[in-house]
Image (tube, rainbow, N blue to C red):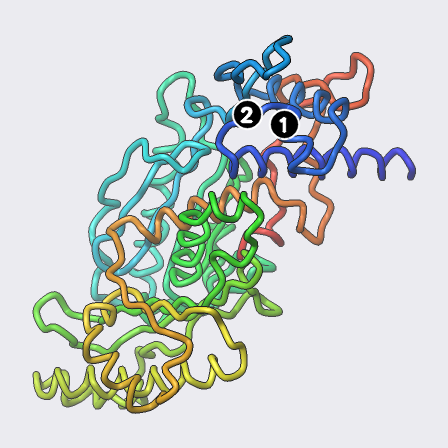
Amino acid sequence: MAGTGRQRTREINILAAMRALISLGTASRSELAAHVGLDRSTMTHITSTLLAAGLIEPVAEAPAGSRGGRRAELLSVDRSRYAILSADLQSRNPRWLLTNLRGERLQDGQLGPSMPAAGGAVRRAWVEGILDDLRHMVRSQPAGRQVIGVGIALPGLFDRSRTRLVESFELGLRDVDLQALWNCSSPPLFAANDATCYAWREIAARRDELSRGEPTAADGVYVYTKFHTDGERFLATGMGVGVTIVADGHIVRGHRGAAGELRGYRHSDDDEDQLGIDLEAIRRGEGQEAAITTAASELIRNLGVIASVLDPPRIVVCGDLGLSAERFRAIAAEINHAGRPEIEYRTAEPLAVARGAAQMVLEGLFSPDAQVDRPLLRPDTAPAMVPGSSNRESGFSRGIAPENALQ
């Protein structure tokens, strides 16, 4: 039992060093040791393990100090050997992105056709086809590059304990076992609501501030909005709104990971109203501007409640409603006279959600927060020295338990 405890401590230290190096970009062993809170000898063992696994590489020597002496070797996350594949599975124009472990773009592109306007079985087959395409991309990487994690962002509610899409109003799907559709354990699959992945993008963008010891740099409420259209009319079938909260630099998760969707249009004959919008009037092509104003008013009121309870430092509204910033400001001024917290309005970059999904994968691969046993060093994979051992070989395993696959 004691041995198991020591092994778990080693794994946690290895993961902490890897996350620190991802955040810092480059660092010496001494800098890593100070950042993680370990002694130099322990960090030397840890970096030997990571070097042997090919996850990090020496990149340069630090400038000589005032006292001269041997220059420290600088280390960085390997930028070429390992990659993360991510995808934004929106119903229209789904996209994929390949990044290295520093989050730098390697490739991106369109991911198959838009979702067909058909029944649930056809829509499920569309998701299966997307996952088949991702598997093909994993297998077709050039020599010397390996995908070690795949992340997908979808609109809808998730059960993070089982990698399961509970319901997606936009995609018209319910109870989809994504892990079963993925049907392979390596590389592991991660999935989350698209609003949550947008928040992950914000965390990645503020990595430098977070690495400097500013844990609240990315904190706030992130609202991701999408107009549901039929390709011709501006707002044909309603609007989807996702909300994610970041506190102390971490995504706030619900009990089953089902948090994310604030409101979404349900594809049902019984639903005539969503976010105060008269859907039938929209289908007739009437009242588009009034519908958006009504939806924005209701959303601002909801955000006012969230703000009064959580007191976030910022609220960020991104996506389609981010285009209506001036209208939002006028409505917010009428509802929230104090003007706090300030609301930021943004238009999302085309790959923002996919970049967030990649950051989610990195967090999942190198985070020790999992509530299940998830050993990362196994003797049946590529050889790597285990810290604190004598001539014992082990390897870096990318196996992630399904219970940890949703953020």
Label 2 with label 1: CB-CB less than 8 Å: yes
Residue type pointed to by label 1: Phe
- Kindly tell me whether residue 190 is visible in this rendering: yes
Q: Is residue 114 left or right of residue 382?
A: left
- Percent position (x, y) of residue 166? 48, 68
Q: For residue 145, which numbered disc appears in the image?
A: none
Residue designated by label 1: 396
x, y percent for residue 119: 28, 68
Q: Assign a secondary structure to mark 2.
A: loop
Residue at image position (35%, 59%) is 124
Instruction: Using the rendered image of the protein, determine whether residue 274 is visible from the camera's viewpoint.
Output: no
Image quarter of residue 273: bottom left
- Which residue is painted at 76% across and 33% down in the image? 10
Residue 55: give its label: 2
Q: Is residue 238 above or below residue 260?
A: below
* Label 2 CA crowd tier, 10 Å (few <14, some 14–19, many 20+): some
Query: Could you tell me which quadrant the N terminus lies in?
Result: top right
Q: Earlier in the sequence, mark 2 or mark 1?
A: 2
Q: Which one is in front in this view, the residue at disc 2 or the one at disc 1?
A: 2
